[in-house]
């Protein structure tokens, strides 16, 4: 009779779980880590908003040729025209359609943002892993190089380098990518220092795994969470960087459209005061893109960290 | 039953800011196929360092400076890292103390199990997976097909330790080093794990070095026991002799410090006063001098050697109290030799 009431008696592993743990384990069984992080991320209101805005940006950038009413470089007769049904956001000082340029500008921002971050995350991860895992002189050398890079006035160096190699979309992406890695390298190194002391890394060594395998397959996945958050914020700052460079004339070359070089037109007081359709939309776009990405970063961090805190 | 492992007077030293520090000194033991030796002693006495020395898993500032470790006649002490990698996981495997942290949280159980199998046994992905499931079943994990795709955080401590054992034994190692495999588990799970290890041992003829400070585990598992104190083996014998006829004052102290079922209700357990001497300041003579109830003047100055005495089975002690027995044993051996020749 007692056995009937307590069907778990015969299962040795189930017997040692208290009911709460059993429930938690049952819950855990139904969702993977990724699933859990996604759920938490989507529950985060700001992050969800950011995700939607960002998704719209990505769609717009991908579908630019379809969505834009005109060719972004086509010159119309009436320049400086205020918004009308033909040109929803008016035309600029040369007579190009502002809306079309705005739409094509999103391609530039996203390319620079994602491209530069991809480059520097790759560099940062490799250097950080090497420094953290091998320690000693490898660590010494890599970290001193990192210090040197971090002591540069970031913006000035980028400005100078871009002016040397010549402003273009691929050049800005590469330059930002080549200069942005120190923060990631430090982050990764820090994580690796603690992860490499974990028993599962020692167990890997004890099972005869090769060093690259341990570093990339066992340590790296455990260090990915903070990298991901950092990279998200990195995309936002790379977009701002591109806009700043373009604004200063060191970014994407006109006539190609970028939000930054569209803002250049706001340099004149007349435009600033009487033609807001020239500078307000690109400014708003930069703000929205950066904000949405930062919200996503926040949400991602919360989702991952609350998982780790559990 | 050939000799599998012969550890001969190894000395492990660590380079520190305060100079070289000796952690393990003159530790010797040998092990036959399918035999289990327990290394016993309190925290910090060099049990783990001894096992890490065998595996070449010491931190970068530590190394074996003297002595030899022979595995099947192969010298391990000066083996290169690349050669050692082939030995690890393949010929010698290791289980760690903390099952909660010994599995990588971001890889599935299957990923972690098949990795070693594919590496050392050259199985394909599919074969390795099937073999992994088979190993999980062997260590008594229910629902093994489901568990392979699970992440470690869904398993309890006992289950994880079973997975660790499956991982360690999957490549059929000749020697398994288990560093306090049951310390972090509760008693019922502990008993299950020990039972499992015993079963696997008799099935696969794997020799085991079991590191523990739990004399109950020793009684359950060991064939031979080496009692360690402050980096040295102070007494080595088979498990029955150790419990029936402990000799070294430290072993005697250990025995008194465990509860026994025949103890009267109001009896208090005895503890050994004092603590292990610091590695920076090892006494010149006997290392147990400070805490030994039988300490003599001589123990302060001279260093006792680990010598065999006459007993039912082989029995060696590092203590001057048994000098007479040790000498008699040596003379007897001499006599026997002369008779033979």
Image: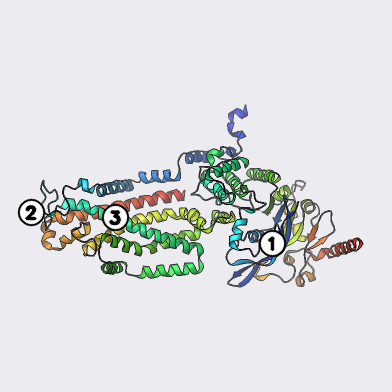
Graded by Cα atoms within 10 Å as few (under 14), some (14 to 19) or many (20 or more), the crowding at tag 2 reads: few
Say what secondary structure mark 2 lies in.
loop
Residue B223 at x, y = what percent? Answer: 75, 51
Residue B332 at x, y = what percent? Answer: 88, 62
Q: Is residue A254 above or below residue A66?
A: below
A41 and A266: which is toward the camera? A266
Do badges 3 and 1 share one subunit?
A: no
Tell which circle, 2 or 3, labels the residue nearer the N-terminal end: 2
- Residue in the picture at 29% in, 55% down: A111
> Residue B339: which quarter of the image?
bottom right
Quadrant of the frame with the N terminus of chain A: top right
Q: Which mark is residue B233?
A: none
Whole-number angstrom distance, CA of label 2 to CA of label 1:
90 Å
B252 and B243: which is toward the camera? B243
Graded by Cα atoms within 10 Å as few (under 14), some (14 to 19) or many (20 or more), the crowding at tag 3 reads: some
Q: Which residue is mark 3?
A: A111
Residue A179 at x, y = what percent? Answer: 35, 65
Residue B25 appears anywhere in the view: no
Graded by Cα atoms within 10 Å as few (under 14), some (14 to 19) or many (20 or more), the crowding at tag 1 reads: many
Residue B148 appears anywhere in the view: yes
Q: Quick check: A99 left or right of A34?
A: left
Whole-number angstrom distance, CA of label 2 to CA of label 3:
31 Å
Chain bearing tag 2 is: A
Q: Which mark is residue B69?
A: 1
Whole-number angstrom distance, CA of label 3 to CA of label 1:
59 Å
Say what secondary structure mark 3 lies in.
helix
Q: Is residue B224 above or below residue B292?
A: above
> Residue B82: which quarter of the image?
bottom right
Q: Which residue is mark 2?
A: A77
- Residue in the picture at 80% in, 52% down: B244
Chain bearing tag 3 is: A
**Residues at circles 2 and 3 in contact by the CB criterion of under 8 Å:** no
């Amino acid at each position: 009779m007692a056995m009937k009431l307590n069907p778990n008696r015969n299962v040795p592993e189930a017997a040692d779980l208290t009911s709460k743990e059993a429930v938690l384990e049952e819950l855990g069984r139904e969702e993977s880590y990724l699933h859990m992080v996604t759920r938490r991320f989507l529950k985060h209101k700001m992050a969800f908003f950011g995700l939607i805005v960002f998704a719209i940006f990505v769609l717009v950038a991908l579908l630019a040729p379809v969505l834009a009413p005109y060719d972004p470089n086509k010159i119309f007769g009436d320049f400086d025209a205020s918004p009308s049904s033909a040109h929803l956001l008016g035309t600029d000082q040369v007579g190009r359609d502002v809306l079309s340029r705005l739409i094509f500008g999103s391609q530039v921002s996203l390319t620079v943002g994602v491209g530069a971050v991809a480059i520097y995350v790759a560099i940062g991860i490799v250097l950080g892993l090497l420094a953290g895992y091998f320690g000693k002189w490898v660590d010494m050398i890599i970290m001193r190089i990192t210090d040197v890079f971090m002591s540069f006035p970031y913006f000035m160096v980028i400005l100078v380098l871009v002016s040397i190699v010549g402003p273009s979309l691929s050049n800005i992406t590469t330059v930002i990518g080549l200069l942005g890695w120190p923060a990631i390298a430090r982050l990764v190194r820090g994580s690796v220092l603690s992860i490499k002391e974990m028993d599962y890394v020692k167990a890997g060594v004890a099972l005869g795994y090769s060093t690259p395998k341990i570093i990339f397959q066992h340590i790296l996945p455990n260090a990915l969470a903070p990298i991901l958050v950092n990279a998200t914020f990195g995309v936002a700052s790379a977009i701002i960087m591109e806009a700043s460079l373009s604004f200063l004339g060191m970014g994407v070359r006109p006539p190609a459209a970028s939000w930054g070089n569209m803002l250049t037109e706001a340099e004149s007081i007349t435009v600033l005061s009487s033609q807001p359709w020239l500078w307000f939309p690109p400014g708003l776009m930069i703000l929205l893109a950066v904000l949405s990405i930062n919200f996503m970063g926040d949400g991602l961090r919360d989702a991952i960290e609350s998982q780790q805190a559990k | 039953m050939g000799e599998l492992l012969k550890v001969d007077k190894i000395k492990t030293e660590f380079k520190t800011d305060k100079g070289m520090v000796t952690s393990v000194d003159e530790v010797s033991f040998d092990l036959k196929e399918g035999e289990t030796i327990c290394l016993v002693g309190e925290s910090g006495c060099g049990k783990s360092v001894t096992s890490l020395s065998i595996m070449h898993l010491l931190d970068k500032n530590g190394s074996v400076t003297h002595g030899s470790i022979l595995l099947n006649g192969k010298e391990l002490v000066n083996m290169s890292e690349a050669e050692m990698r082939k030995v690890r996981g393949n010929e010698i495997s290791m289980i760690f103390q903390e099952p909660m942290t010994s599995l990588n949280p971001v890889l599935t159980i299957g990923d972690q199990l098949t990795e070693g199998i594919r590496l050392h046994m050259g199985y394909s992905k599919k074969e390795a997976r099937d073999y992994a499931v088979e190993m999980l079943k062997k260590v008594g994990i229910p629902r093994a097909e489901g568990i392979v795709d699970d992440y470690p955080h869904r398993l309890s401590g006992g289950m994880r330790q079973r997975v660790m054992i499956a991982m360690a034994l999957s490549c059929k190692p000749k020697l398994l080093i288990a560093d306090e495999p049951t310390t972090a588990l509760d008693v019922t799970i502990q008993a299950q794990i020990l039972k499992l290890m015993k079963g696997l041992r008799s099935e696969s003829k794997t020799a085991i070095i079991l590191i523990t400070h739990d004399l109950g585990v020793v009684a359950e598992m060991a064939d031979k026991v080496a009692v360690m104190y402050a980096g040295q083996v102070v007494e080595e014998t088979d498990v029955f002799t150790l419990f029936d006829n402990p000799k070294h004052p430290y072993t005697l102290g250990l025995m008194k410090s465990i509860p026994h079922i025949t103890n009267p209700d109001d009896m208090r357990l005895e503890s050994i006063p004092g603590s292990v001497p610091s590695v920076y300041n090892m006494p010149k003579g006997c290392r147990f001098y400070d805490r030994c109830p039988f300490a003599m003047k001589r123990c302060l100055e001279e260093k006792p050697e680990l010598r065999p005495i006459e007993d039912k089975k082989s029995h060696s002690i590092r203590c001057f109290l048994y000098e007479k027995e040790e000498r008699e044993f040596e003379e007897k051996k001499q006599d026997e030799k002369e008779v033979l020749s």
